[in-house]
Structure formats: C-alpha cells, structure tokens
Amino acid sequence: MKILIKNGRLLDPKNGIDQTCDIAIASGRVVGIGNLDPSFEAKRVVDAQGLAVVPGLIDLSVRLREPGFEHRATLESEMNASLAGGVTSLVIPPDTDPVLDEPGLVEMLKHRAKQLNQANLYPLGAMTLGLKGETITEMAELTEAGCVAFSQAVHPLIDYGVLYRTMLYAKTYDYTLWLYPFDASLSKGGVAASGPFASRTGLAGVPVQAETIALHALFELQKSTGVRLHLCRVSSAAGLDLVRKAKAEGLPVSCDVSINQIHLIDQDIGFFDSNYRLDPPLRSQRDRDAIRQGLADGTIDAICSDHTPVDDDGKLLPFSEAEQGATGVELLFSLVYKWALETKTPVLDALAKITTQPASILLSGAPALPPCGQLDIGAPADLALVDLDAAWVVNRESISSQSCHTPFFGYELPAKVKMTLVGGRVVWESA
C-alpha cells in the first residue's frame, strides 16, 4: 500500500533532521521525504499534524517468553506490546526453554514471528549448549539459522578457559559476543545492591565488585583475542569507569543500560515492593547519576527495556523470593523521553540511543541485515507516530503486555505512540 504521512515533525537522528515535512511510502520503503513526486498517489493519507514521526525503535533485550514460558506471556501479546511502544525491531536473548542453542529452534522461533507478520525479530544464539558454560555451540550453523550474535543471557561463564576459547572462535568468524558482566560467586543469594539501604532493610546484598571483577576479566581476555564485545546492562559508576577506559584504549566494545537504572535507585524499593526486584539490582543515586553522565558523554551506546514479563505467581511474593524482571518494552520511548526532559538532553540525541546507535551495534555483528533505526530514502518504512505532548498513566488498562508488573506502575509518563508501521504496513494504531 502507498501511504502518505502529512505534516508530521520528522525526527531522524541519523541525518540530524528535526523538521515538519511529508513522507511517502511505497513497496514497504520510504520513497520520498519533503518535496514529493507530484505523481505519487497514496491509497491512505495519514494526517500527522501535531505528531512526531520517528524511526522504529530498536530494543536490545526483549524476552517474548516463547518457547517455554507461555504462561507468563506469548509471542502475540509481547510483540503487540512492542508495537504499542513504537518498537519495530527486537533482540531476543537465548534463555528460552529450550535454549536457543540449535539451528532448528532458532528457525522455529523466526518462523513463528514471520507468521505473525509484525515486528522484526533478531535472536541471539546461546554461546554454550544449554547455557551451562561447558560446551561451545555451533555458532556458524546458528548464524545461518538467523542469529545476529551470541550470548549467555544472565547465565555466568564460570570457566574462563571456555570463555577464552569462545572468544577465539567468535573472533575467527567476526561474531559479536553479548555478555552480561557479573561474577556469580560474589552475588549468590543477593537480591539488592550492597549498601546502606540493603543493610538497613536486611536484604542480602550484591556488591559492585560482582560487576567490576567480571569486567576486568572480560577486558583482559578481549585484549588477547581482539573479539568484539557488547556489554549488557552495565549498572554501576565503577563499571562505567572501566568501560570508559576500555573504549579509550581502543578496544572494540559497546554497552547498553536498562531504562530502569536510568530512573530508579535502590531506595525506590521502599517497603519491599517486588516490582522493583530487578537484575541487575537497582543501585545508589551516585550510580544512577553516573549512568546519566555515561549517556551524555557517549560511554553508554544504547538504552534497552530489558523486557522480562513475570506473572503474578512470580511477583506476588516476599521481595527476596520474588522473580526478577519487569515489563518495559512499551514504556521505552516514554521513559527515554522523560529522561531527556529531566536532563535537558536534545531529543535527537536521546532518540539516537534507541534507534541509530543500537542499529550500529546490531549491524556491526550482522552486516547483512536490512538497515534499521533510520528513515533514509530507500530504507524499510519502519516508523512510529508519537504525540510528544500526551501524558498517560501506566496501569493494567493502558499496557498491552500480558504482564503488568513494572516498577513504573501508576506513573504518569510523557509521550504516547499513536501509530506504528513495519515494512510500510500499519501494524498498530491507537483506538
């Protein structure tokens, strides 16, 4: 279908565009911006007066809970939630059940997603069989099946010999490893960040050294192998200092943070609210301030939702027993925009953290992927129309995810997505 989007405020970080203009879409691609061909005849005209037109968002960590955890969420519910938040490209961690360690499982997941014909799905392959940290997977076959990179999700690689051999393998074939930096031996039983709050409330602590020691080890092995690393959910000031130094040394490394850590700190847990039971745990205000500084100075490349739907059985428990995780994919744009308003970050700079920069991370390990996170002429027409002046309350009625457990439940957030297109098709629009 030929679509004409009229009078929208185009926000395109890749090209530094912030202006009101028309956008023409045909055959699933952007075919005109601004001065359009007079012969272009649209079958649908969308009046975007008062709305921003942004590239489809890219979320680097979204658990769709299929296969294996359909009682918590389904592919349909969570992909619909992503589209309701303007997220058109999803990176899927490999910790499904069964684990994404065989080509057939990856192909099955991609086939299911293709049948739904909604958002673009990019699975991460498991680095080791069963994520047990013992035997390296057949990465070449998993890449052919559609994996864009390789990860242990939140499962630790205790054996540094296995990690070293995995890095050598990945470097040989120019694969990227996505690693969550934490030392499991230092975080056993921990449910909150070590510090005054955990001590005062009696919650078992997770020391910052669980992150920094893991980062030291990763960077030492990276120096000897040259492998490209993407660090997932760095959460501390000390950890970000190490990432900053690694980048200054020229190591091929990128990193992301969860949207939760940008806004929240350990004291927000309050009276043991299990919606704040997250991984990594919420840290101090000093750490949150360091994360915001890392976003400003470029140490942090991308922001993700770390979307992990949890059902009532997993959340309605005492804090220490509750399952880690929170719904977040459809809150991503609003929470990033809220951060931009609070810190006076230019909107294009903020938008880049969820469009062009995660796209760069994706394409560095999988250059054959179609372009995403941009609105160039000829690029796939993945985009969202957003009312930046709208305000909405996060509650059971306003979110589409099967899980309503989020630390932002009850918050009033700015900006609301009104329409989402993927491949030039309108796949979601507000009532």
Image (tube, helix red, strand yellow):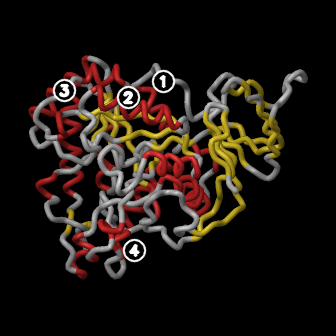
Would residue 248 be visible to someone looking at this image?
Answer: no
Q: Residue at x 63, y 46 (%)?
A: 428
Secondary structure of residue under mark 2: loop
Between 331 and 288, the one lying in front of the other is 331
* Amino acid type indicated by mark 2: Val
Judge left or right: residue 127 versus residue 115.
left
Count residues near mark 4 (Cα–Cα under 10 Å), then give few for <14, some for 14-19, many for 20+: some
Quarter of the rendering occupied by the N terminus: top right
Residue under circle 1? 369
Residue bearing mark 4: 268
Structural distance between the alpha carbons of marks 3 and 4: 41 Å
Per the image, label 4 sits on a secondary structure element best described as helix
Sequence-first disc among 2 and 3 = 2
Q: Amino acid at mark 4?
A: Asp
- Which residue bears the numbered disc 3? 224
Real-space CA distance between mark 1 and mark 3, rounded to the nearest whole angstrom: 29 Å
Mark 3 or mark 4, which has the lower sequence index? 3
Residues at discs 1 and 3 in contact (Cβ within 8 Å) = no
Give the label, 1 or 3, closer to the camera.
1
Q: Can I make out residue 296 in this image?
A: yes
Q: What residue would you read off at disc 2?
A: 148
Q: Nearer the viewer, residue 359 or 300?
A: 359
Position above or below: 309 against 35: below
